[in-house]
Image (tube, grey):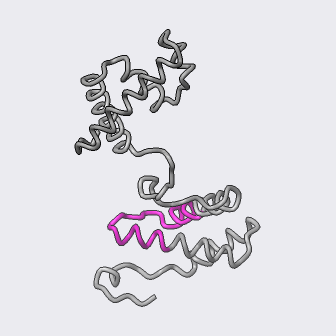
Amino acid sequence: MTRTSGEDRERPPVDSSLWRKLVRWLSGQGRTREDSEDFVQSAFLRMEEQLRRGTEVREQEAFLKHTIRNLMVDSYRKTRFGSMVEEPVEDLAIESDAPTPADVFEGDEFLRRICEHLDQYVGKVTCQIYVYNRVYGYTYDDIAELTGKSPRTVEKHIARAVAVLVELRKRGDPA
């Protein structure tokens, strides 16, 4: 390897006998020569990275063998379980139909404003019936059973609420 910086020149070159020893060690464990060389090369690169960071590696052979074992485990896991995404989960673009927390907050605020207006113009009962129907999806019969009113009365409450909201919209009120 050719080295250019002064820091690199102080470090001894890769020990070729250690390289060969590690390749033989891996080959003896049933690895092909090509796989063995790939693992050894990756381990040497990781050691080089540690040395560049200023980390002292006292026992190079032990460090390299430990690194090779970790690389073999990673390789096994990737082939057995499929490749895992190596990015942090926070950086992944995960598509979801679920509303974001901001959307939920905006929806709650919008519903709060609607209820304030309905309470003011037609009363709490009409607001409650409207919310049961339009927000929670209850049928007129379900609401009638919950409130003790007839389905026809429930329909009238919802019609009044809708009329008030349409009138507010015409006047420019966003609720």
Q: Residue at x 56, y 19 (%)?
A: 142
Magenta range is 45-68
Q: Is residue 66 left or right of residue 79?
A: left
Residue 76 lies, in percent from the top left, at 67, 60
Residue at the right extreme of this rendering: 30
x and y percentages locating residue 175 in the rendered image: 29, 39
Residue 141 among those drawn in magenta: no
Q: Position of residue 106 (x, y in %)?
A: 32, 41
- Image height check: is 118 above or below 35? above
Q: Is residue 137 left or right of residue 50?
A: right
Nearer to the camera, 40 or 85: 85
| Residue 114, placed above or below residue 28 | above
* Residue 66: in magenta span: yes
| Dominant secondary-structure state across the stretch colored magenta | helix
Most foreground residue, 11 or 162: 162
Give the left or right position of residue 172, taking residue 134 as reference: left
Q: Relative to 50, does residue 152 appear above or below in the rendering?
A: above
As drawn, 38 above or below 81: below
Q: Residue at x 36, y 23 (%)?
A: 127
For the residue pair 31 and 101, the one nearer the viewer reads as 101
Q: Position of residue 132 (x, y in %)?
A: 46, 25
Image quadrant assignment for residue 114: top left
Q: Residue at x 51, y 19 (%)?
A: 152
Residue nearest the viewer, comparing 149 with 93: 149
Q: Looking at the rendering, which quadrant does residue 75 occupy? A: bottom right
